[in-house]
Image (cartoon, rainbow, N blue to C red):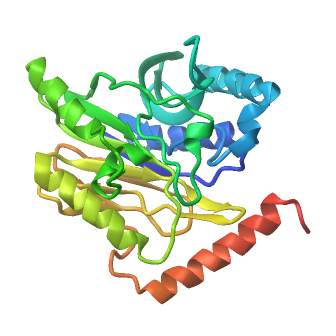
Amino acid sequence: MKIALVQVNPIIGDFRYNCEKITRFAQKAVTAGCDLAVFPELAVSGYPPLDLLERRSFIDDHEAAVKKLIEELPPIPVMFGCFERCEEPAGKPLYNSVFVARGGTIVHKTRKQLLPEYDVFDENRYFEPGSPSDLFSCGGLNIGVTVCEDIWHYAVDEYHSRPVADLHAQALKKGRSLDLLINVSASPYHRGKTQVRQSIFSTLTAQYGIPFFYVNQVGGQDSLLFDGVSLALDGSGKTIARAAHFEEDMVVVDTEQWSGELRSNGETEEVELVHDALVMGIHDYVTKSGFS
């Protein structure tokens, strides 16, 4: 099976622009012979939508955009982040979710369980935590899907829930194997972030001995800069695919050979990364704000 890891640069709240981009890259994945395309967290709205989530019209328009997107996607399964309404009588009104769409229908859902509320994050203000989801089967693989922070309990001591451990235990209980872990993310860049992420990813693969794919948003969103660098590790923790820094990109991973495309160097000097982050951030602030 071939899987496309697609890092896109959304405009927050521009549903038409974002959905057209998702559809275009999904079609590119089909052309590349892929059997599954994976996009970042909240790819439809862009991350972070912040207090736009408190506007009913924003939620209604997003819901309509997701429905239209699902109808227009190519026939392969496409995994993308969006939010959805929480119908429970108590709690927050929304979930931070990942949908897998195929043939005009939703074939799998995962809802983010760990909602960060430190540093620049305040997701508990808007979202209700999700419950553990079932595995998603595709191309003969049983895939566990997590959303950004769901793997960061390795670095944040305050979390008591362990979403990856729950997925693994659930698979064992049902007599199934957990063959691949995918993390759909919108993780902002700061100096040293590359090393922090790599430590978490290596810990995951070492603990469970399964391949791990990470798909991150890219682009500047006001004060937040997203570096992309989506990547894939095989079961031994070796990096087999890596997307570019600070630009949109799509890399393809072959799960038969556990091999892929390496578009960026994992040893890039920090000063170069900071330079590229600043250039991208200024460019995106000017263009997304409509300045000429």
* Of the pair 184 and 100, the residue shown nearer to us: 184
In the rendered structure, the answer to whether residue 104 lies left or right of residue 159 reads: right
Name the quadrant of the C terminus.
bottom right
Residue at image coords 45%, 37%: 30
Residue at image coords 56%, 22%: 91
Position of residue 180 measured from the top left corner of the image (x, y, whole percent): 22, 40
In this rendering, the answer to whether 278 lies above or below 6 is below
Name the quadrant of the N terminus.
top left
Question: Residue reaching furthest front?
Answer: 158
Position of residue 155 measured from the top left corner of the image (x, y, whole percent): 32, 58
In this rendering, the answer to whether 147 lies above or below 156 is above
In this rendering, the answer to whether 38 lies above or below 6 is above
Write down the quadrant of residue 285 in the picture: bottom right
Q: Is residue 104 visible?
A: yes
The number of discs equals 0
Position of residue 58 measured from the top left corner of the image (x, y, whole percent): 77, 30
Residue at image coords 76%, 26%: 61
In this rendering, the answer to whether 57 lies above or below 186 is above
* Of the pair 233 and 146, the residue shown nearer to us: 146
Position of residue 21 measured from the top left corner of the image (x, y, whole percent): 64, 44
Question: Residue reaching furthest right?
Answer: 292
Residue at image coords 19%, 27%: 140
